[in-house]
Amino acid sequence: MNTAVDAVRKQEHRALAAAGASPLTRTKYAWLRNPATFSANAWREFAALRDSTLQTARAWAMKESLRRLWEYTDVGAARTVFRRWYGWAMRSRLEPMKKVARMLQAHLENILTYLTHRITNAVTEGFNAKIQWIKYSARGFRDREAFKMAISFHCGGLDLEPRPA
């Protein structure tokens, strides 16, 4: 979503800069930040941009609206909220937002499964990265058993702390 919001901002900034001064100059990171991290002063400064009729403001509102989807635990309610958001995104006439909406629609069942179970494959991906590092740092192994032993050593959670006698 951040990539899509930034793409909308870039397009709009180019168009406004070509026509004169652009209010989007030096605002990239304001659009990409989590609103919970804004200070009171930064929020006041951003409010004028947020409440404007800029296309970027609409894209940002879509991004923030979709953020609430992850708080749902009821799949039916989440599906309804997504359907409404999807319709909004598709009617927005903002191609980067429509592209993200189509991608999310294609993966909606997996997203809804996450809302039920709250499990990701992040731990598995972390182990895979560590195993790839082991393979790379050894510059290959002579046999499969040596590779298994290296994986067990680095990923097995061995306690190598000497114990007092």
Image: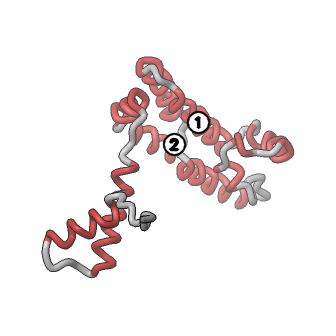
Residue under label 1: 62
Residue in the image at 31% along x and 68% along y: 132
- Are the residues at dot 2 and dot 1 in contact (C-beta closer than 8 Å)? yes
Residue in the image at 21% along x and 70% along y: 147
Q: Amino acid at mark 1?
A: Met
Q: What percent of the width, then of the height, locates residue 110?
A: 34, 35
The quarter holding residue 126 reads: bottom left
**Mark 1 surroundings within 10 Å by alpha-carbon count, few (fewer than 14), some (14 through 19), many (20 or more):** some
Q: What percent of the width, then of the height, locates residue 154?
A: 34, 66
Q: Would residue 148 appear left or right of 131 to someone viewing this image? A: left
Q: What percent of the width, then of the height, locates residue 158?
A: 35, 61
Q: Would residue 65 appear left or right of 13 to someone viewing this image? A: left
**Mark 2 surroundings within 10 Å by alpha-carbon count, few (fewer than 14), some (14 through 19), many (20 or more):** many
Residue in the image at 71% along x and 51% along y: 30
Residue under label 2: 97
The quarter holding residue 57 reads: top right
- The answer to whether residue 92 is visible is yes
Q: What percent of the width, then of the height, locates residue 43?
A: 80, 42
Residue in the image at 77% along x and 58% along y: 20
